Every structure is written in C-alpha cells, then in structure tokens.
Image: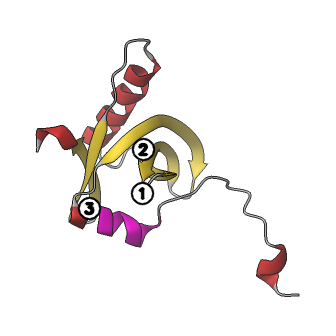
C-alpha cells in the first residue's frame, strides 16, 4: 500500500494552487464570492481565505495578511459586508502584479 492510499488531507477545503491562481489572473476569470474568512498561522502567517466558485465548484484561496495593504482592506471590508443582511452578490477579478496577487471588482471591467 502506497502513501497516498492512506493519506488524509487535514487542511480540508478545495484549495486553488499557485499555478491555478496564475491562470485565473491571466484569463480574467470572474470569481463569485461565497465568503471571506480569516485563518491564523498559515504557511506565511495569518491569512484571509476567499471562498469562491470556479467551474461550479467551491474553491478556496489564501492571501497572507500584511503583504498587500489594498488587498487586506478589500478582504476585511468584504468580510464585514457579506455578514450584513442586505449584502448583494460580489464578483472579483484576480490580477498579478510582479509577485503579488491583487483583487478588484470584476463588474468594473
């Protein structure tokens, strides 16, 4: 029996890999937001977790807090907005600028 026959992924979720993020940014794929949460102690520190739907499947993307101020502000405020009773659907767009991933309003394009 091989390792992956018994491996259990304790992280949970269906995470978007870095190569997938790159493709989503290049394609300008719309990312309908399901939720935004926070997670302590990620690989590079505390993170925002953006839960979205890609090709009909719920997927998660993590963004380290403190590395991109504008992205932190957007995700922090979006988390609060989505918790409100009158929140309307939000769709984001992912773009890559050098080594950073930025999020913006897909509808503004």
Q: Nearer the viewer, mark 3 or mark 2?
A: 3
**Disc 1, disc 2: CB below 8 Å?**
no
- Please state which of residues 18 and 73 is positioned toward the viewer in this rendering: 18
- Please state which of residues 38 and 14 is positioned toward the viewer in this rendering: 14
Q: Quadrant of the C terminus?
A: top left
Residue to which mark 1 is pinned: 55
Q: Residue at x 31, y 68 (%)?
A: 22
Q: Residue at x 39, y 39 (%)?
A: 33
Seen from this angle, which residue lies furthest bottom? Answer: 1
- The first of marks 3 and 2 along the sequence is 3
Q: Position of residue 92 (x, y in %)?
A: 28, 43
Q: Which residues are magenta?
A: 17-25
* Spatial CA span between label 3 and label 2: 20 Å
**The magenta stretch spans residue 18:** yes
Q: Residue at x 80, y 82 (%)?
A: 3
Q: Quadrant of the N terminus?
A: bottom right
**Disc 3, disc 1: CB below 8 Å?**
no
Residue to which mark 3 is pinned: 25
Q: Which mark is residue 65?
A: 2
Is disc 1 surrounded by few (<14), some (14 to 19) or many (20+) residues within 10 Å?
few
**The magenta stretch spans residue 96:** no
């Amino acid at each position: 029996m091989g390792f992956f026959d018994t491996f259990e992924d304790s992280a949970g979720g269906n995470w978007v890999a870095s190569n997938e993020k790159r493709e989503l940014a290049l394609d300008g794929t719309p990312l309908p937001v399901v939720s935004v949460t926070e997670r302590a102690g990620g690989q590079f520190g505390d993170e925002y977790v953006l839960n979205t739907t890609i090709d009909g499947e719920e997927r998660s993307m993590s963004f380290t807090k403190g590395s991109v101020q504008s992205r932190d502000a957007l995700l922090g405020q979006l988390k609060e907005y989505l918790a409100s009773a009158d929140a309307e659907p939000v769709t984001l767009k992912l773009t890559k600028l050098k080594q950073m991933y930025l999020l913006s309003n897909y509808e503004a394009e």
